[in-house]
Image (cartoon, grey):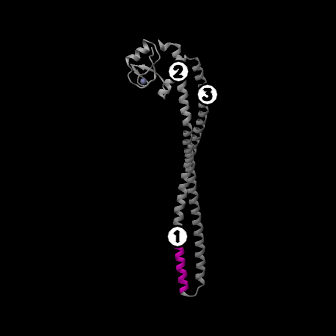
Amino acid sequence: MLFEEPEFQALLLLHGRDRRKIGAEAELRDLPKVLEVVKNKIEIEKETIASAQIELRELETKASSLGNQIASIETKISQQKTKQLEVKRQEEYQALENEIKGLQDQMSANEDDQLETLMKVDDARATLVIAEGKHTDRVHSLEKQLEELNERDTLLRQEIGELEQEIKASGEEMDPTFLREYERVKKVVRRPPYVVPVEDQKCSGCNLRVSNDIVSSILVEEKLTVCDQCGRVVYIQR
Ligand SMILES: [Zn+2]
């Protein structure tokens, strides 16, 4: 049986190493994209906290400015009331009365606004506390992911280096005819797997039925055979 021959087993070993190397290289190639996605997520989390902080600060500033306005209106009202005591003419008294009334209306509007703003400050502060807790946890787990991805990068490079050595060793130990045929198949097929078993007379690479000639080439002639549909090396495991 060709399948049991050391030459064929060597081919399967090389194929296994090749596939692992191709897989590791693909993962390494995609790693920067994955890293970028995680980094962006961290940025978004940080921006969310920052914008909650800005909102709170703006509301606090507004509340304090309203407080100042109210205090200054109060001062003005008491000043005008003092003036009122000093004026002699009725018109002047009335004019001050109107002015005081306007100031009082303004103050009452400011007080309403201040109350509403202070309630918003409380809400914003509570939101920020929750957001900070939640986002800090999320940022922490994202940073951990980032760390793991960097470790994965190192590991993959190491693995690829080792596989290159092993592939080189495999090639040197292999039957040159098999190696040439395998290299040719790799160019034709382009994507792994390059060596596949035939099961129920179907090539497990392309899932198509192989001809009886192919089966006989494998089992009777015991030759290195390729699928007549997809060009992969096919074998029967028996
Ligand atoms: Zn096939």
> Which element type, helix, strand or loop, lies under badge 3?
helix
> Which residue in the protein does label 1 denote?
108
* 216 to the left or right of 168: left
Closest to the observer, 161 or 152: 161
**Residue drawn at point x = 51 percent, y = 22 percent:** 182
Q: Position of residue 39 (x, y in %)?
A: 57, 43
Closest to the observer, 160 or 138: 160
> Which residue in the protein does label 3 denote?
161
Q: Earlier in the sequence, mark 3 or mark 1?
A: 1
Is most of the magenta stretch helix, strand or loop?
helix
C-alpha distance separating marks 3 and 2: 23 Å
* 14 to the left or right of 209: right
Amino acid of disc 3: Gly
Amino acid of disc 1: Ser
> Which element type, helix, strand or loop, lies under badge 1?
helix
Which of the 4 quarters of the picture holds residue 70?
A: bottom right
Looking at the image, is 66 positioned above or below residue 139?
below
C-alpha distance separating marks 2 and 1: 93 Å
Which of the 4 quarters of the picture holds residue 207?
A: top left
> Which residue in the protein does label 2 denote?
180
Closest to the observer, 183 or 94: 183
Amino acid of disc 2: Arg
The residue range painted magenta reads 91-107
